[in-house]
């Protein structure tokens, strides 16, 4: 599934001259912390990502498009943000199929396991992973970074709520405009990283969306875009995971980090925010050209 996601994201934008980039990039992404941690923990992140990439990019226009998104959301709630992606990009029929699949599967689960279903929606969903007090370094989300900088409490949660709404609004604009310019993968990545930021708990292994991001950047780097090469180098530095071994963590020690510790300790969130600023600047600059494109060789 990892290879399939990478191939779908990469191959369509790489000329025959650079076909070797696909297997080389596959081997390269294995050193990224979200990828190797996902594989080491036996998590489903890569599978869910693959389902969403297939549904939103490959099955677009199919009468089955949206079903895989609904299935992914039934397995894990976070892919529900891609229903909004379908709506923003004008694929309302696909969004309806996604929601129908999600509701249908949850209804079936309620009939088969009624006690567990009620417990999930009434208790586990709210208390899971201690989202309101989870300042651990492994939680790379807006909720996590605000708690680590501002402490815990109701005021912090209010700030997080405002930031999440702002993130959703800005991402919606970016997705709409990128989709209008025919940059489907770019729009998909904006939604994916917005989902990681607004989710109350985004473990580092949830950030496997760095794989299609690498696939997005590689062809642009091969065509000479300096910004894409800088971005790839930054992903290697940030995404290798060294930060999580040198910064003190656990037992809420993160609440007492110095600035020097906070920068690497919040590396994923800060990198995503910097990328968002970069996209916004290129989006609204005066010269009308593709937002994230490089000149073709």
Image (tube, rainbow, N blue to C red):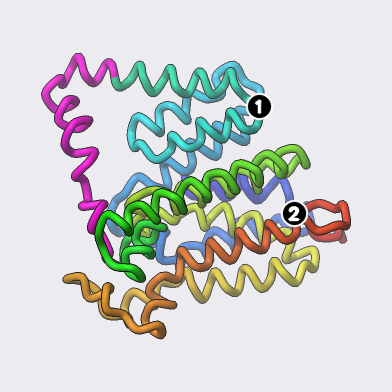
Q: Residue at x 88, y 57 (%)?
A: 287
Locate residue 252, reporting x and y percent: 21, 70
Residue 86 location, quadrant: top right
Residue under label 2: 283
Above or below for 276 versus 245 = above
Is there any visible trace of residue 63 in the rendered image?
Answer: yes
Residue 48 location, quadrant: top left
Is there any visible trace of residue 38 in the rendered image?
Answer: no
Of 267 and 4, which appears nearest the observer? Answer: 267
Locate residue 155, reporting x and y percent: 31, 57
Above or below for 284 versus 4 = below
Asked if marks 2 and 1 touch (Cβ < 8 Å), the reply is no
Mark 1, residues whose alpha carbon is within 10 Å: few (<14), some, or many (≥20)?
Answer: few
Give the secondary structure at mark 2. helix
Task: Name the residue furthest front.
Answer: 155
Task: Name the residue furthest left.
Answer: 115
Of 168 and 14, which appears nearest the observer? Answer: 168
Of 107 and 173, which appears nearest the observer? Answer: 173
Which stretch is magenta? 107-136
The earlier-in-sequence mark between 2 and 1 is: 1
Numbered circle sitting on residue 196:
none
Q: Is residue 125 magenta?
A: yes
Locate residue 82, reporting x and y percent: 51, 35
Residue under label 1: 90
The alpha-carbon separation of the residues under discs 2 and 1 comes to 20 Å
Q: Is residue 191 magenta?
A: no
Q: Residue at x 27, y 73 (%)?
A: 255
Residue 134 location, quadrant: bottom left
């Amino acid at each position: 599934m990892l290879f399939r996601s990478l191939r779908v994201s990469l191959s369509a934008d790489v000329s025959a001259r650079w076909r070797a980039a696909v297997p080389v990039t596959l081997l390269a992404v294995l050193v990224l912390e979200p990828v190797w941690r996902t594989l080491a923990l036996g998590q489903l992140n890569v599978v869910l990502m693959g389902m969403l990439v297939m549904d939103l990019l490959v099955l677009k226009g199919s009468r089955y498009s949206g079903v895989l998104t609904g299935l992914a959301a039934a397995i894990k709630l976070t892919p529900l943000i891609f229903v909004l992606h379908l709506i923003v990009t004008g694929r309302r029929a696909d969004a309806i199929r996604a929601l129908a699949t999600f509701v249908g599967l949850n209804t079936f689960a309620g009939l088969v396991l009624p006690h567990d279903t009620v417990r999930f929606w009434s208790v586990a969903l709210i208390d899971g992973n201690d989202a309101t007090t989870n300042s651990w370094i492994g939680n790379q989300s807006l909720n996590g970074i605000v708690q680590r900088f501002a402490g815990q409490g109701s005021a912090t949660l209010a700030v997080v709520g405002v930031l999440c709404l702002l993130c959703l609004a800005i991402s919606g604009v970016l997705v709409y405009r990128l989709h209008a310019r025919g940059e489907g993968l770019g729009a998909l990545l904006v939604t994916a990283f917005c989902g990681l930021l607004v989710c109350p708990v985004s473990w580092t292994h949830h950030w496997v969306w760095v794989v299609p991001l690498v696939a997005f950047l590689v062809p642009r780097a091969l065509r000479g875009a300096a910004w894409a090469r800088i971005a790839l180098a930054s992903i290697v530095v940030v995404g290798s995971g060294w930060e999580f071994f040198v910064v003190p963590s656990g037992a809420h020690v993160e609440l007492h980090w110095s600035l020097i510790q906070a920068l690497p300790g919040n590396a994923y969130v800060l990198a995503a925010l910097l990328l968002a600023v970069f996209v916004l600047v290129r989006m609204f600059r005066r010269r009308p050209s593709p937002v994230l494109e490089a000149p073709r060789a």
